[in-house]
């Protein structure tokens, strides 16, 4: 009873307040029923009934007390709870006021710090952007776009895959690092290679050791000269030559050709092919199709099929539907078909059935879209998609032509 005591006067008062029980039946009817009831013929049972009547009254009284007392106690507890809630509300309001004051002070301090350290803030923002980009790159993204280049410099590199092929990757280097290493100039792909190739942790990225190239690289105008040492191994087989020349294509942009020389300046000769001519550089315009290539560690990349080229973009887009060999997979799922419609300024890829990208496995959907975009980029052409359910998806706006990628397979700047 929560330490509340009741005296006999209160109990008596409660009992008096109980309702009176009235019986409106005729006395003759009651008497007749009593005479007919066998329980009243035996004196022993009548005595038992008399003994139970006081007990029943007491039980009724206790039941009434059990009903009234908790009700009164609940009222008291509700009042106490209301007081406690009011007190809690007051304490919460005080804490919120203190928090607002602290936030205001913190905001003022942040503003002061920003005014004092703008350059540091820009550097941190650039670093955070690079980290976020790297995280996205290692999950779904298979390409780099113009909007990714703010505050960044593109470093293209052909890395060695499991099956002795060059996989084109794109590394973004913060311009703050470029300014530190080169000053206020825009380095060429050759200068970027000379500075960073030896520092890239190829095995840490899941590739074989291949860079820097053996021998000496020189730049003369719009041409590169590779002076090869004896026993360089780039000509050990036709596959080795193919890997070597493709890696040069994937790495050096902004130059017209690569010439091959011995260390003494005489023309180099490759086993099996003799003296090679100058290698024309395509600067990313490889006129090829992109497919899914999977490394032994399970990582997947978008890559050309050993440099296979096509006469035009519609032909390359038609070929992308098929699996070319056992090493590459098509980026187009089997149940999806499309038509290619060349136009003056854009090539339209129109799906035959409405494509719902959200119902597809997200990685496969991204590989399909970006494989098509990279194929278009290898011809320097822009694509527009039609008959896709989503108007916007993963940063793509399908209501208009999509931007041309500037590189494939984004990678973090992982240094040794």
Image: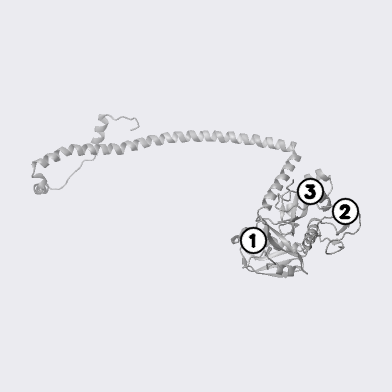
Which disc number belongs to residue 201? Answer: none
* Quarter where residue 121 is shown: top right
Q: Nearer the viewer, residue 72 or 314?
A: 314
Sequence-first tag of 1 and 3: 3
Residue at the (26%, 32%) spot, across then down: 11
Q: Nearer the viewer, residue 178 or 15?
A: 178
On the image, the x and y values in percent for residue 92 come to 53, 35
Which scheme is used to colour this image of the protein? Answer: one colour
Which disc number belongs to residue 219? Answer: 2
Q: Work out how far the residue at label 2 is from the one at label 3, CA to CA, in angstroms.
A: 18 Å
Q: Work out how far the residue at label 1 is from the one at label 2, CA to CA, in angstroms.
A: 41 Å
* Quarter where residue 102 is shown: top right
Q: Nearer the viewer, mark 1 or mark 3?
A: 3
* Quarter that holds the N terminus: top left
On the image, the x and y values in percent for residue 214 come to 82, 52
On the image, the x and y values in percent for residue 59 come to 23, 38
Query: Mark 3: which secondary structure?
Result: helix
Query: Mark 1: which secondary structure?
Result: helix
Q: Which residue is mark 3?
A: 198
Task: Answer above or below: position of 376 versus 206.
Answer: below
Task: Answer above or below: position of 133 versus 327.
Answer: above
Q: Nearer the viewer, residue 160 or 254?
A: 160
Classify 10 Å Cα crowding around label 3: few (below 14), some (14-19), many (20 and above).
some
Q: Which residue is mark 1?
A: 365
Q: Nearer the viewer, mark 1 or mark 2?
A: 2
Q: Work out how far the residue at label 1 is from the one at label 3, CA to CA, in angstroms.
A: 35 Å
Residue at the (58%, 34%) spot, across then down: 97
Task: Answer above or below: position of 114 versus 365.
Answer: above
């Amino acid at each position: 009873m929560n330490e509340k005591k009741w005296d006999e006067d209160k109990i008596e008062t409660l009992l008096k307040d109980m309702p009176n029980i009235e019986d409106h039946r005729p006395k003759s009817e009651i008497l007749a029923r009593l005479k007919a009831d066998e329980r009243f013929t035996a004196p022993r049972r009548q005595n038992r009934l008399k003994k139970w009547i006081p007990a029943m009254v007491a039980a009724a009284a206790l039941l009434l007390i059990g009903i009234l007392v908790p009700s009164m106690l609940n009222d008291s507890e509700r009042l106490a709870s209301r007081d406690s809630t009011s007190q809690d509300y007051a304490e919460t309001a005080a804490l919120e006021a203190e928090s607002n004051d602290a936030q205001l002070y913190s905001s003022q301090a942040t503003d002061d710090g920003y005014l004092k350290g703008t350059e540091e803030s820009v550097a941190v923002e650039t670093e955070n952007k690079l980290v976020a980009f790297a995280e996205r790159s290692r999950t779904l993204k298979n390409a780099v776009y113009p909007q990714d280049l703010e505050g960044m410099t593109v470093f293209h590199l052909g890395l060695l895959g499991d099956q002795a092929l060059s996989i084109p990757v794109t590394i973004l280097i913060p311009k703050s690092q470029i300014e530190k290493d080169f000053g206020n100039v825009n380095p060429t792909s050759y200068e970027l290679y000379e500075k960073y190739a030896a520092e890239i942790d190829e095995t840490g990225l899941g590739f074989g050791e291949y860079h820097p190239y053996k021998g000496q690289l020189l730049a003369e105008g719009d041409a590169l000269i590779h002076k090869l040492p004896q026993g360089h191994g780039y000509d050990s087989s036709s596959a080795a030559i193919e890997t070597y020349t493709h890696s040069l294509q994937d790495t050096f942009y902004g130059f017209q050709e690569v010439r091959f020389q011995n260390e003494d300046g005489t023309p180099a000769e490759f086993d099996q092919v003799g003296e090679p001519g100058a290698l024309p550089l395509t600067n990313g315009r490889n006129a090829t199709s992109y497919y899914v290539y999977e490394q032994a560690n399970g990582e997947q990349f978008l890559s050309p099929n050993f440099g296979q080229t096509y006469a035009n973009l519609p032909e390359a887009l038609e070929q992308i539907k098929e699996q070319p060999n056992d090493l590459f997979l098509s980026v187009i799922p089997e149940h999806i078909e499309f038509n290619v419609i060349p136009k003056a300024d854009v090539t339209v890829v129109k799906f035959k059935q409405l494509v719902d990208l959200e119902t597809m496995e997200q990685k496969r959907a991204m590989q399909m879209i970006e494989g098509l975009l990279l194929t278009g980029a290898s011809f320097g052409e822009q694509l527009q998609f039609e008959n896709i359910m989503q108007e916007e998806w993963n940063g793509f706006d399908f209501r208009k032509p999509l931007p041309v990628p500037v590189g494939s397979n984004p990678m973090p700047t992982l240094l040794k």
